[in-house]
Amino acid sequence: MPAPNIDTIVSLAKRRGFVFPSSEVYGGLGSAWDYGPLGVELCNNVKQSWWRWLVYERDDIEGIDSSIILNRLVWKYSGHEATFHDPLVDCRECKSRMRADKLEGYFPAGDHAVQFDANERLRGGLVKCANCGSTNLTDERYFNMMFRTTLGAAAAEEDPAALAYLRPETAQGIFINFLNVQTTMRRKIPFGIAQVGKSFRNEITPGNFILRTREFEQMEMEYFVKPDAEHLKLVDEWVELYVEWFKGLGIDGRNLMLHEVPADELAHYSKRTVDIMYRYFPERPEEERQWEELMGIAYRTDFDLRSHSNKPVDEEGNRINAESTEDLSYFDESTKTRFYPHVIEPAAGVNRTVLAVLMDAYSEKTNDKGETRVILKLAPQLAPIKAAILPLAKNKPEIVGMAKAIKRSLQPTLRAVYDDTGGIGKLYARQDEIGTPLCVTVDHQSLEDEAVTVRDRDTWEQERVKVSDLPEHLQRRLQQ
Ligand code: GAP
């Protein structure tokens, strides 16, 4: 039973130290969230799982970490300066500001591909405000979603020479480093470059907790292949691999769905995109409104490497990029040909993965006293804490000493905590709620037989284990 709605996770996340509303002491900052002690561990575990899976376990992927602020020309030639924008409208009645293309009535009924004049529809009263239902809306205007900043202490705010952007995707840092990675690591196509890091978008309507925020983290990989590779099939292959990876993180396949993005909704660089959707809104009665994008897998063609290169020319023979100092083409030794590699891009969000993982791990169980307990059935590899060491009696120095010594001995190899801030029932309940797979209890008998009780989070079953066998026992259980 996954969480019934996102609100259940918001409340658990705040109560147990996963995610806090940001800047709360100043009244908050719309749709900004801070990750607490358990949240940062969960995020790190998701990112590590992804990195291990792609960079360590495969032979064809390298990792990088590029700057967040890149030369402005990167965003000029990537197309983001000209096209990374959303249509915006204001409601004259309730003063809300909204993304126009998300409003009821924006598109003519039926086919999205049909040509239409959005402002004509807005003026004709066909489009409804999402907040108050009024049709008294302004014309739409386009709003670029990149955050602007100025570089250098002396730069005037409006100085175009000092203008820079916070990256809206990690992908461009990979493209501009394609040759650096390929030559230094002596890579042959096909190979990929992975990067994980923060991205920033000045979203018009952020919301739904960590689902859509202005600052977020992406895990992107650009997979470079030959121009004549089977690109559309490769998209399907990567979709399949990612669906399996999500399932390995504990997400039920029934809460994942594939969405083929219609041609008229594709990003400017994409020839095909398949989104993997997660059921973030199970409470909505209409099935089609329950889903939101978890990640996208796009076929980006050779668009980016060409755009950042100084050699390609347009139909009139003019260079498409006279400002680049490099040609990012690749020389294929086997065929003695030079070309711009094509790219398959799986692009996932860390925060959306964390939210999906939390929602899917959420469950409730009733104990023998009829009390309902929350159990967060996180996959052990993702659990912020792997084992909690609990003394049965905190006023018995020998028991406390033994529990603390066990915790210290486990610490170098797994994340363990010691807790004596309540009765054993309460301590178990707290660990269940934060997803700790195993609890280790030290009791009076432990002092006699050098053994402890290991309790399983999901079944509540208990097993007696010798302290000398404990590290190996826990490692084995955590890998199951
Ligand atoms: N390089 C391609 C790219 O950035 P995208 O579909 O715009 O593609 C990829 O973003 C993923 O990044 C999304 O599927 C989502 O998981 C995450 N993402 C995008 N915008 C986000 C936002 N405002 N808040 C949280 N996550 C976001």
Image (cartoon, rainbow, N blue to C red):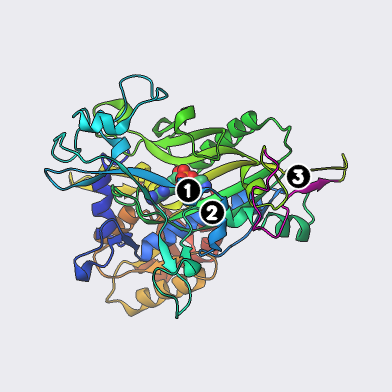
Q: Is residue 294 visible?
A: yes
Q: Residue at x 51, y 72 (%)?
A: 409
Q: Is residue 321 magenta?
A: yes
Q: Residue furthest top?
A: 110
Q: Position of residue 99 (x, y in %)?
A: 30, 42
Range of magenta residues: 316-332
> Helix, strand or loop at disc 3?
loop
Q: Are marks 1 and 3 in contact (CB under 8 Å)?
A: no
Query: How far apart are the two marked residues, 2 and 1, measured between alpha carbons?
Result: 7 Å
The disc placed on residue 76 is 2
Mark 2: few, some, or many residues within 10 Å (few <14, many ≥20)? some
In the rendered image, the quadrant that contains the N terminus is: top left
The mark lying in front, picked from 1 and 3, is 1
Position of 271 relative to 35 (above/below): above
Q: Is residue 415 magenta?
A: no
Viewer-nearest residue: 238 or 358:
238
Q: Which residue is mark 3?
A: 189
Mark 3 Cβ inside 8 Å of ligand 1: no
Q: Residue furthest left?
A: 93
Judged by its main secondary structure, the magenta piece is loop
Q: Are marks 2 and 1 in contact (CB under 8 Å)?
A: yes
Q: Amino acid at mark 2?
A: Lys
Q: Residue 233's quadrant in the figure? A: top right
Viewer-nearest residue: 242 or 259:
259
